[in-house]
Image (spheres, helix red, strand yellow):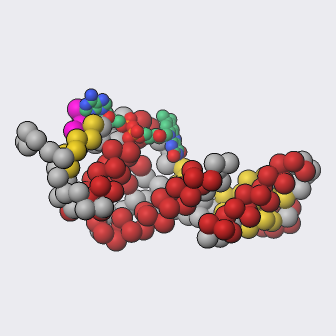
Amino acid sequence: MKTSTRVVIIGGGVVGCSVAYHLTKLGWSDVVLLERSELTSGSTWHAAGGFHTLNGDTNMAALQGYTIKLYHELEELTGMSCGLHHVGGVTLADNQDSFDMLLAERAKHRYMGLETEIVGPEEIAKIAPITNTDGIIGALYDPLDGHLDPSGTTHAYAKAARIGGAEI
Ligand SMILES: Cc1cc2nc3c(=O)[nH]c(=O)nc-3n(C[C@H](O)[C@H](O)[C@H](O)COP(=O)(O)OP(=O)(O)OC[C@H]3O[C@@H](n4cnc5c(N)ncnc54)[C@H](O)[C@@H]3O)c2cc1C
């Protein structure tokens, strides 16, 4: 193992492996990631793997949107599956204040290039037939919402980082 390197990342969960990949993507190949046990042995192993773009913080929403698109890039680069399932998601509003918040989110998404949609009760019933739409004013629908395999995704990040020269 190297005794000197430009950067050491401690922890081989999804975050550490993503940082390793992004550093190599930006041109830093002298990167070492240290994991005390095995990759994905922390919180990442327990995660349900759900993802969505709705977030009150614009930077977080942009980061989530960026990451959802990144999984496809990662699969192409590594030939590994992230276990992506874009099942879509609806965030419901049962009062005017919540609905106004969703309208504001949609406006933000339009600016960010995210293809979410404001839908009414009839469309909600078509998208997710088990939903009780009594008292629901509307919803924000995101076709990209879904879930993935956290372990597979972490290993894909690790492979992509290794391709870029990182040592794990
Ligand atoms: C039950 C549950 C469900 C979740 N569901 C979701 C979900 O649906 N969607 C979502 O986005 N997030 C979800 N999360 C959150 C998500 O799992 C975490 O945000 C994410 O996994 C954190 O990744 P991490 O790499 O920061 O940490 P970890 O995965 O915990 O990785 C840290 C790593 O560091 C290693 N380590 C620690 N100390 C050292 C050391 N001194 N030297 C070397 N290695 C060390 C550990 O062994 C571990 O592998 C869920 C979490 C839980 C617990």
Residue at 48% x, 66% y: name it.
69
x then y, percent, for residue 108? 69, 62
Verify whether residue 142 appears in magenta: no
Verify whether residue 35 appears in magenta: yes
In-front residue for pair 132/36: 36
* Left or right, 9 with reference to 100: left
x then y, percent, for residue 79? 29, 68
Ligand 1 positioned in quadrant: top left
Q: Main secondary structure of the magenta part?
A: loop
x then y, percent, for residue 52? 59, 55
Position of 78 relative to 2 (above/below): below
Residue at 84% x, 54% y: name it.
100
Q: Provide the residue span drawn in magenta.
A: 34-38
Residue at 29% x, 55% y: name it.
23
Q: How many marks?
A: 0
* Left or right, 135 with reference to 139: right
- Quarter of the rendering occupied by the N terminus: top left
